[in-house]
Image (spheres, grey):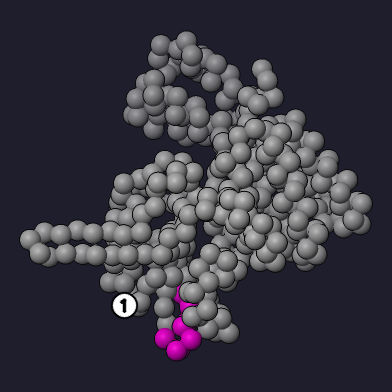
């Protein structure tokens, strides 16, 4: 088996985006939605409204959720406002995306009576998928909903990319990591980009807290096969020593590596459940979900081999 197929983990982009938005929300707006950033009174702070949003999503019940964040803040005129940030990280376009943006916006406004700005960040690689507008019309009774949208691959050009690399906004590293994670398939090239982005943090003189937080986000977005991940970490440790900046301590390194192992195991479990669903149906996959999720990596690999020849779900566990 080649190193490429050696258990390259499936990237989970939702969680790093949520972490990055919580840690760098003003910087996120300043980079991707500067006009909105300029209209906010940042001296009054901002707060994440996770409980309120969870209730709205539960009531909406319109399919899969993505990396969504609802944030309460104040405009420069002193009036309160809420910002709904919706990050779409799927590789394929979704026809219901604009409708979901409208439904969320309407339900938030209806439930809490505050102005809501819905922002879309599209991290997929399809240049044609650019939803900015939802329209519905029945006998002259019409809805026309428009929302600001940013397409991340628009930064991946010879003209725009240098501005990201030169930016002192820490969220630029998140955007670059997302673009490279989606657009770069060759493991060696992914490793080179991962090292380059991590090194930028040190070269810019970021504080230790920022380096550790951004390291986790980049490390989560750009995942590598096992042997390349080991080589990457050794390069980082060597680079830290040369800079006399041992920010990622032994304890933190162990925590990062533990997180990577958990991420690999979850990816293996999700893949096996997908195989079970395709071969034996959704009912079987749901019935076995808890058992598969609690298995260790060695067991998951064994079951993944057995499913190739198993005639029934029970045959996986013999």
* Above or below 210: residue 316: above
Q: Is residue 143 left or right of residue 291?
A: left
Residue at 73% across / 36% down in the picture?
229
Position above or below: 261 against 33: above
Q: Nearer the viewer, residue 9 or 204?
A: 204
Q: Which residues are magenta?
A: 72-79
- Whether residue 106 can be seen here: yes
Residue 174, x across and y down, in percent: 62, 56
Q: Quadrant of residue 68?
A: bottom left
**318 shown above or below 157:** above
**Quadrant position of residue 246:** bottom right
What residue do we see at 91% from left, 51% from top?
241
Placement of the N terminus among the 4 image quadrants: top right
Could one spot residue 257 in this view of the protein? no
Say left or right for 288 vs 157: left
**For the stretch drawn in magenta, what is the main secondary structure?**
loop
- Residue at mark 1: 113
């Amino acid at each position: 088996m080649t190193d490429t197929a050696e258990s390259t983990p499936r990237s989970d982009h939702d969680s790093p985006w949520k972490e990055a938005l919580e840690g760098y929300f003003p910087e996120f707006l300043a980079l991707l939605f500067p006009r909105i950033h300029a209209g906010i009174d940042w001296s009054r702070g901002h707060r994440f409204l996770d409980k309120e949003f969870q209730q709205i999503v539960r009531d909406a019940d319109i399919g899969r959720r993505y990396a969504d964040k609802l944030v309460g803040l104040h405009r420069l005129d002193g009036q309160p406002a809420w910002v709904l940030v919706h990050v779409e990280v799927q590789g394929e376009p979704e026809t219901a995306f604009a409708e979901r943006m409208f439904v969320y916006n309407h339900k938030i406004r209806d439930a809490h009576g505050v102005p809501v700005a819905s922002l879309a960040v599209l991290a997929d690689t399809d240049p044609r998928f650019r939803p900015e507008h939802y329209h519905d019309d029945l006998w002259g009774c019409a809805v026309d909903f428009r929302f600001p949208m940013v397409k991340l691959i628009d930064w991946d050009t010879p003209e725009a990319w240098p501005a990201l690399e030169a930016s002192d906004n820490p969220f630029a590293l998140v955007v670059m990591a997302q673009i490279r994670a989606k657009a770069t398939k060759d493991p060696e090239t992914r490793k080179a980009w991962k090292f380059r982005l991590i090194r930028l943090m040190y070269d810019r003189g970021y504080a230790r807290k920022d380096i550790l937080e951004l390291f986790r986000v980049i490390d989560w977005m750009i995942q590598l096969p096992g042997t390349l991940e080991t080589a990457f970490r050794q390069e980082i440790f060597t680079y830290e020593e040369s800079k006399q900046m041992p920010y990622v301590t032994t304890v933190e390194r162990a925590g990062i590596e533990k997180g990577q192992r958990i991420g690999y195991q979850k990816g293996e479990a999700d893949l096996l459940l997908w195989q079970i669903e395709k071969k034996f149906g959704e009912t079987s996959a749901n019935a076995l979900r808890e058992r598969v999720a609690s298995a260790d990596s060695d067991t998951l690999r064994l079951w993944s081999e057995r499913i190739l020849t198993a005639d029934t779900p029970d045959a996986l566990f013999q």
